[in-house]
Image (cartoon, rainbow, N blue to C red):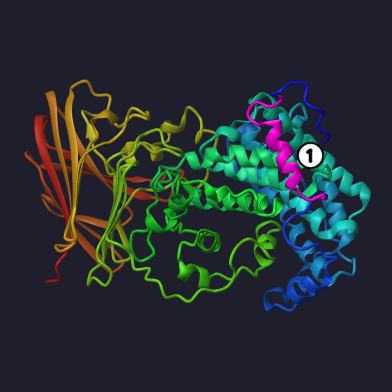
Amino acid sequence: MKIAPAKSEKPYADLTPTRIAELAALLPEQPRGFGEPCRNRPAWIALATNKKFADVVQSAATQIGKDLPPWSDDLYLDFSRTGQRPAGEKMMDDRHNVIRPLVWAECIENNGRFIPDIEKMLLAYTDEPSWTRPAHDPELKNFNGTAYSVDLQSSKLAHELAQVLWLLGDKISAGTRAKVIATAEQRIFAPLHESFRTGKGTPFLYRETNWNSVCLAGSVGAALTALPDRNDRALFAAAGEYYSRYYLAGFTADGYCGEGLGYWNYGMSHFLLLREQLWQATGGKVELFNNEKIRNAALYGINIEMINGVYPAIADCHWGTKPDVEFLSDLSQALNLGLHHHETTWDPVTPRDLIFTPMEIFPNSLNRVKTPNTASEDICLRSFFEQAGVLVCRTASGATKTMSAVLKGGHNAEPHNHNDIGSFTLVYGKEVLVADPGGPTVYNSRTFSAERYTIKLFTSLTHSVPVVAGRAQIPSRNACTKVLKTDFTEARDEIIMDIASAYEAPELKKLVRTFIFDRRAGSLTVQDDFEFSRDSAFELALTTRANWKQIAANQIELTAGSERIIAEIQAPCGIDVTSEIIAEDCLPFTRLGLKLKQPLTSGKVVVTFRAATTE
């Protein structure tokens, strides 16, 4: 791609010619990617002796001569017909993953026997009608070749194909190399160049979500690795430097990630990737980690832990998700976070993809000297994300019976939002007794559309929050928590939230939820104080995947594994308990409705959770 000389002082919407020229002067004459090209035999011979690479060549040899899994127009079009995503995405992933082991094997063995298959795959990829996921091509413009858009899939594929060209060098024929770069120009570089010029057409540039870091890492990485002209590469380097600020803008100053832990893994790992690309390409002169937000944002994966390796499933996060030890180790070393346990337990020398793995196993900006694990990493009593209104409470390290709760404020317009302000998650030992249900098992056409809240999973009806005068919470930035008071001590944590704005109920005059986490008593108290202008119904809910039974008029027992707790309810007129199994697009869970027996104009409902005593 040749960029014509600027005809005005501002040829780009946000990028300046001066900065682009400065970056061009820092970049190498020739493009380069992560790792060493296979012509550097000492580097690859040393790697081949690692036991984790022992079976790479033998395994890849079994794939010689085999065809790629076929491209299927029918599977790509399945989303446009049915709104279902898995079939088309799996078809594309199955094709794109096949080339990786063959490239690793060729770099190690270096005798050319894998090259014919690699070239055939590269050409097959350029012949695919679209590199963009079907769900991100709703009008089928990519599929029909009328316009191309950059998404999570296309940017990643472009980067990985650029890495193939870099690692294998002149083993790939000039014709194949030219076709790969021309296809990337058509589908990635040209659309982005137009967006750089106009500031329009590519929303991810301004998104404060994982899309920003993932798509920038892929597209900037592909450009730095494959574009022959240094000025062209400098344009993309400038874009990565400038637009990546929007990703970090999505974090609060104290490091809260509204997208939840799963998307923090995805987005932050690619921000790290983008940082390393720019750092290496400019000899350390561009440093994205100079942003004042990065340290707290990087620590989100540590600070959001409850206890015993259990993490909350807020927003679209799935239960069982943990911070990725691979890039948490990288972050710790790059930012000197002192997470020595993570640094010493992660071994990067494993052949996986062609982007992250070469970045990590070859020389990079990180300190690969293993630091003795001398710093204390004992979990602290609490993590309070004040700007987000989210509190994580924990018992002290070494407590006889460990307990933790996540008490969530926030607002109902967060990325991957669930209408859940005032919700809570409760863990005893390693067992989750009351929980956010987590994200859907699969996404479909309704998930990120105007129909999102027609799916019950995303509504407040499937979270441990009140139902007010028969109404659920609304999705809105105006539906936001107002924290009225906090009182934190070694013995107990108290936080009081006004959550009335989450409900469009004209009769509602007051709704205040108080949480008291008592470490000494081993209890969590949830208190709702409400007031209406007329008699109205009031209900609260417990969401759980634990076993449950009502053992008294005002007591519910929850059991999971070896843990058993009692929820004792104090209500002015008694409660009726209902249960519903929710299994729409998610792992099944139970919603326990605790509804006051009669409408009231005001009242107070208190639920106290404590471990059941052994008789």
Q: Secondary structure at mark 1?
A: helix
Query: Which residue position is annotated with label 1?
Result: 231
Say which quadrant the N terminus sits in: top right
Magenta residue span: 11-30
Q: Residue at position x 45%, y 66% from top?
A: 339
Residue 121 in picture, x, y percent from top left: 83, 52
Residue ID at (46%, 57%) = 321
Residue 573 lies in what quarter of the image? top left
Q: Position of residue 73 (x, y in %)?
A: 74, 38
Query: Which amino acid, by three-letter code, is at mark 1?
Result: Asn
- Of 463 and 184, which appears nearest the observer? 184
Q: Is residue 561 above or below residue 16?
A: below
Image quadrant occupied by the C terminus: bottom left
Instruction: Classify residue 146 by image quadrant.
Output: top right
Q: What residue do we see at 74% from left, 71% from top?
A: 56
Q: How many marks?
A: 1
Left or right, residue 300 beside residue 421: right
In the displayed structure, 456 sits above or below 435; it is: above
* Residue 182 visible in the snapshot: yes
* Magenta-drawn stretch contains 468: no
Q: Is residue 392 left or right of residue 567?
A: right
Q: Residues within 10 Å of mark 1 (few under 14, many from 20)?
A: many
Left or right of residue 300: residue 331: right
Q: Residue 566: give x, y in percent of width and height.
A: 17, 58
Percent from the top left, x then y, of residue 520?
15, 64
Residue 74 visible in this rendered orientation of the protein: no
